[in-house]
Amino acid sequence: SERQDREHLYTFKVVVIGDSGVGKSNLLSRFTKDQFTHEDPTIGVELNTNVVNLQGKPIQINFWDTAGQERYRASTSINYRKAAGALIVYDISHRKSFTNVDFWLRELQMFGEERIVTLLVGNKCDLESSRAVSRAEAQTFADAHDMMFVETSALESTNVESTFRALVEEIYRRAT
Ligand code: GDP
Ligand code: MG
């Protein structure tokens, strides 16, 4: 019945963090609506929802997408509260967005749950000719901080679906 379905619906919160302009909102809109936009970043916190089926069970994911001057905003712990997962996104063609991953990791350590599943995402991998961060360097960094690592392109839909799925599978594995 519908009631039983609802009782068995898992809901997880996932925060999507990283510098402004790295493609957080577009990764989410690609995953939840299969849409991409060339527009400028919006301001505020956007909520996005998607349902992923794992072993026949619907898992609802509530994404918290921060926007605006993320790097300099006063950090609010409420963004991180009860998040089961985090995507830390940087832009492979913009080195500063990768060195700033340190800042985002520290925020997670300060405000996030202890067992939060974290995935490092190098977005805009379609911009290979202006690459500023090698795969090997990012992989080494991710290994050192116990994160999964993947490169994506929201523009070309590369690895988007599989990245979100991997995150959800790991969250589910740890929660059950
Ligand atoms: P946010 O500030 O992190 O949410 O970044 P947005 O999703 O708003 O994207 C910022 C800019 O980068 C926009 O102009 C997007 O069109 C562009 N963008 C996002 N993802 C990609 C990508 O995978 N490849 C390329 N080439 N551009 C992207
Ligand atoms: Mg955004």
Image (spheres, helix red, strand yellow):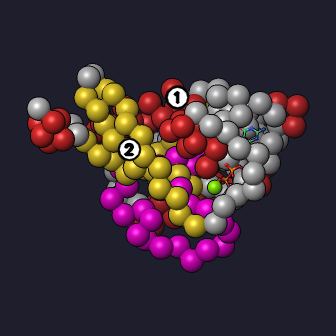
Would residue 89 be visible to someone looking at this image? Answer: yes
Would residue 138 be visible to someone looking at this image? Answer: no
Residue ID for mark 1: 161
Could you tell me which residue is drawn at 80 percent across and 42 percent down? 93
Amino acid marked by disc 1? Glu
Place of residue 119 in the rendered image (x, y in percent of width and height, measured from the top left) = 51, 41
Place of residue 11 in the rendered image (x, y in percent of width and height, measured from the top left) = 29, 46
Q: Is residue 25 left or right of residue 166?
A: right
* Ligand 2 placement by image quarter: bottom right
Image mark count: 2
- Mark carried by residue 114: none
Q: How dense is the environment of label 2, judged by Cα within 10 Å: few (below 14), some, or many (20 and up)?
A: many
Residue ID for mark 2: 61
Could you tell me which residue is drawn at 25 percent across and 29 percent down? 57
Could you tell me which residue is drawn at 64 percent across and 44 percent down? 26
Amino acid marked by disc 2? Ile
In the rendered structure, which segment of residues is drawn in magenta?
65-89
Place of residue 140 in the rendered image (x, y in percent of width and height, measured from the top left) = 62, 37
Place of residue 14 in the rendered image (x, y in percent of width and height, measured from the top left) = 43, 50
Could you tell me which residue is drawn at 67 percent across and 39 percent down? 36
Q: Nearer the viewer, residue 59 or 90?
A: 59
Residue 171: quarter of image: top left
Q: Secondary structure at mark 1?
A: helix
Q: How dense is the environment of label 1, judged by Cα within 10 Å: few (below 14), some, or many (20 and up)?
A: some
